Amino acid sequence: MMVPADTIVAAATPPGTGGVGIVRVSGEKTEQIARTLLGSLPEPRSAAYRAFRNADGQKIDAGLALYFPAPASFTGESVLELHGHGGPLVISLIVDAIVALGARHAEPGEFSQRAFLNGKLDLVQAEAIADLINAGTSQAARAALRSLSGKFSDAVNALAEQLIRLRMHVEAAIDFPEEEIDFLADDLLLARLEECAQAFALLQQQAQQGRVLRDGFQVVIVGRPNAGKSSLLNLLSGQDAAIVTEIAGTTRDILRERIDIDGLAVELVDTAGLREDPDRVEEEGIRRARKALQSADAVLWIQDGTVAEPEALGEPLPEGIPVTVVRNKIDLPESLPVVGEGVIGLSAKTGEGLDALRQHIRKLAGYEDLGQGAFTARRRHLDALERAATHFSTGKMALQEAKAGELLAEELRLSHQALGEITGAVSSDDLLGRIFSQFCIGK
């Protein structure tokens, strides 16, 4: 993508009333706009108290002005930040005045996009800005900050460098056919291939952790009426989020609560009891429960632990989603022994078995607290890594089975290209447009 030559403006603080509101300007007309709006250009990277005036000289507001000349700015362009009062009307008047002076309203994520296009950030770092803003746990925030500082990018670039060395070795063998067999049977090449395979496995594991940290883990609670689904939701969330009664069909809609399990954001979804012949309102709740199941990462099937043969749910659960049976009411004298691999005993009343359930959810998510080694990742990163690893494995197999240097070279090239999509070294306008459209307007 070409870096746009026009000047953009947007509020960098969220809509609503607050003590301070920030307006950000970036582009080639920034200095001209600053002189008109402020009377003169502030000293670079120093806060100056100024009156903000429109093109007619009318005072709009007063506050702090910060000027960052190109290229030493977030976007790589000249940037002006105005810190005024946080009323929606005041912010709107400042933005309108700047538009009248030659700027245009920024698109979502356009400031970060310009930072990427000007080489101030790679694509992973740009995405990490949004991840940090939207982090649901302190662990996720720290991981996003590490991605923003370049930890994930460094790991991808290190693997890309390994692929480059491999490609150089293989291309040399192809360029000198009389030496090709010796080159391709070289112990150094085989050792580098094995090192690269291990690096792919480690990075994929770390990226999967990063994806779970960023996106969280959705657990849907299902079961027959009165099995204790809502009681379990309340127990896990630590609050009375759901109404609990002995009347079957109390839960008519899905309820969502977000909890933190050792830094893992887990969204719990309580559903209407699945049964036959519900009334019309409850039937709509059951329909919504079925819909929630389709997007679940895992399912907890709550059963009455006092019943030897619990009733079936009445419908099959989605394939490919892990289902854990939770035998509730183990605190009652008539409760039966908990048997079966992966079955968890629980008392939603006393909390017995809660720690075991929390650790089981963490295990289902494949989550490990990596501490200072964690970074955030997105599904597109995982997809690109998977394609890169597949091309690498295909090339490695071609070498091992047929000594096919040309096939190995091509697969290594494709693997390298897929890795480049993660940091933006290889990208398309369409991909960049989709990524940055998800950002806040002022970022």
Image (cartoon, helix red, strand yellow):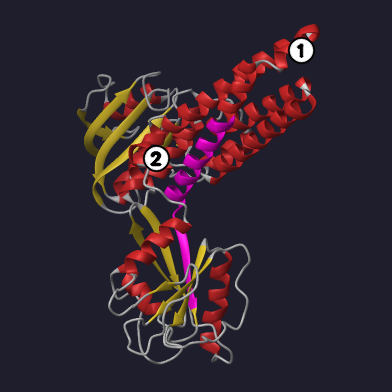
Residue 97 visible, this angle: no
Q: Nearer the viewer, residue 149 or 155?
A: 155
- The boundaries of the magenta stretch are 197-222
Give the labeled residue for mark 1: 180
Give the labeled residue for mark 2: 374
Q: Nearer the viewer, residue 158 or 73?
A: 158
Secondary structure mostly seen in the magenta stretch:
helix
Position in image of residue 256 (x %, y %): 41, 69
- Helix, strand, or loop for circle 2? loop
Position in image of residue 203 (x %, y %): 51, 36
Please report the residue visible at 25 percent of the width from the left and 50 percent of the height from the top: 18
Residue type at mark 2: give it: Ala
As displayed, is residue 44 above or below residue 133? above
Mark 1 closeness class: few <14, some 14–19, many ≥20 residues within 10 Å: some
Mark 2 closeness class: few <14, some 14–19, many ≥20 residues within 10 Å: many
Tell us which disc is closer to us: 1 or 2: 1
Position in image of residue 400 (x %, y %): 73, 28
Please report the residue visible at 51 percent of the width from the left and 44 percent of the height from the top: 378
Residue type at mark 1: give it: Glu
